[in-house]
Image (tube, helix red, strand yellow):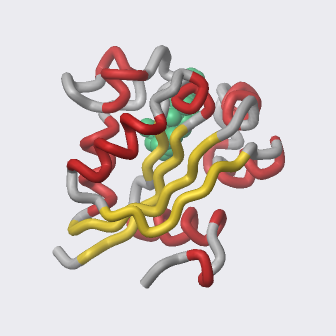
Amino acid sequence: MSLQRTLSIIKPDGVAQGNVGDILKRFEEQEFQIKALKMLHLSPQQASGFYAVHRERSFFQDLVRYMSSGAVVVVVLEAPDAVVRLRELMGATDPRQAAEGTLRKLYATSIEKNVVHGSDSDENARREIQYFFSDSELLD
Ligand code: ATP
Ligand code: MG
């Protein structure tokens, strides 16, 4: 497969726990290229917009509160098959179900505080990258 881009977020728990350096190192070791990166503190409005697909879910309010509770690091990653490969590196949503060696197995503390986000399709990756980055912030 040709090069693809995906969006990752190191979530507030990952930043607060001091996992930023380790997670960025894992991305690079797994041969993802970092194409854009910024640290942000999401407003509740930005967090709700980002996770709008989940607005009917019972955990939505908690999710918005958590995602806007502290700084996050938003990263655009490029690799062959980047969407699927990032999801593999992250592990299952619930860290109790995450495979050994995955980021969530290593660092997540609950199904909510699960350290990292990754886009779940090429279409969503494009939408999510545009949500956070302007064209001039994205490297060719
Ligand atoms: P993400 O979209 O953040 O990469 P995901 O695709 O593995 O995670 P989703 O189903 O899209 O999982 O859920 C989005 C986020 O909502 C989860 O990562 C987690 O932080 C939170 N979440 C999901 N399910 C639950 C739940 N049952 N209870 C509490 N929080 C949840
Ligand atoms: Mg998701």
Q: Nearer the viewer, residue 12 or 1?
A: 12
Residue 127 lies, with reference to residue 113, above or below; the image says: below
Residue 21 vs residue 102: left or right?
right
Q: 119 and 79: which one is in front?
A: 79
Q: Nearer the viewer, residue 125 or 60?
A: 125
Against 100, is 133 above or below? below
Residue at x 25% of width, y 43% of height: 88
Give the residue drawn at x 19%, y 23%: 100
Q: Position of residue 48 (x, y in %)?
A: 74, 46
Q: Indicate the position of residue 123 as horizontal and vertical percent values.
A: 45, 70
Quadrant location of the C terminus in the rendered image: bottom left
Q: Is residue 123 above or below residue 28?
A: below
Tell me the residue at 50%/56% (across/down): 75
Query: Looking at the rendering, which quadrant does residue 61 occupy?
Result: top right
Tell me if 136 is positioned left or right of 119 in this view: right
Residue 133: % across, % down: 62, 70
Residue 85 visible in this rendered orientation of the protein? yes
Residue at image location 62% in from the left, 32% down from the top? 12
Q: Position of residue 112 (x, y in %)?
A: 55, 24
Query: Tag count in the figure?
Result: 0
Q: Nearer the viewer, residue 93 or 67?
A: 67
